[in-house]
Image (cartoon, grey):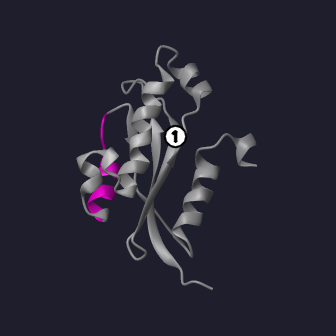
Amino acid sequence: MPAHSSFDYAIVRVVPRVERGECFNAGVIVFCRARRFLAARVALDAQRLAALAPWLVPAELERHLGLIPLICAGDPAGGPIALLPLPERFHWLVAPRSAMIQPSPVHTGVGASPAAALDELFARLVLPAAAAG
């Protein structure tokens, strides 16, 4: 059985109108320093977006959300932030901001696999209840 490691995670939220503070979850970022792991999963729920902001174009938000996993992976397509060291990428991604895409506060967990934790958190916190099973 693999040893357990602590990890940090943040929920990626879409806040269509920052002044109203209404939001919904659209992704999860997980960082485990001990395992040199940084990854994210994102998915935009078009129905939730349409309910809160019918004037927004989902493809545009999906493009911006899609940069998060690229930055985590260190993919140059993620821009200059993707080229930073792993911890700096995580801290940049989870820095508080007043924008349409925002991270939650950082939370901590412990588990044998940060990849499994990412899958479980994504299913529990982002996917609609029917899809999460």
| Image position, residue 21 (x, y; %) | 42, 30
| Image position, residue 6 (x, y; %) | 46, 73
What's the residue at 24%, 58% (across, down)?
84
Main secondary structure along the magenta-highlighted residues? helix
> Can residue 43 be seen from the camera position used here?
yes
Residue at label 1?
Answer: 26
User: In this image, 85 relative to 34: left or right?
Assistant: left
Q: Is residue 18 above or below residue 3?
A: above
In which quadrant is the N terminus drawn? Answer: bottom right
Q: Hey, what amino acid is under mark 1?
A: Ala
| Image position, residue 81 (x, y; %) | 26, 50
Q: Residues within 10 Å of mark 1 (few under 14, many from 20)?
A: many
What's the residue at 47%, 20% (across, down)?
57
Q: Residue furthest front?
A: 76
What's the residue at 33%, 50% (across, down)?
93
Count of all numbered marks drawn on residues in the image: 1
User: In this image, 28 relative to 33: left or right?
Assistant: right
| Image position, residue 105 (x, y; %) | 40, 51
Query: Can you tell which quarter of the image residue 121 is in?
Result: bottom right
Q: Is residue 122 above or below residue 7?
A: above
Q: Is residue 52 above or below residue 6?
A: above
Query: Can you tell which quarter of the image residue 46 is in?
Result: top right
SS for dot 1: strand
Q: Residue furthest top?
A: 55
Magenta stretch in the rendered image: 87-98
What's the residue at 39%, 42% (across, down)?
67
Residue 124 magenta:
no
Query: Can you tell which quarter of the image residue 90 is in?
Result: bottom left
Q: Nearer the viewer, residue 6 or 65?
A: 65
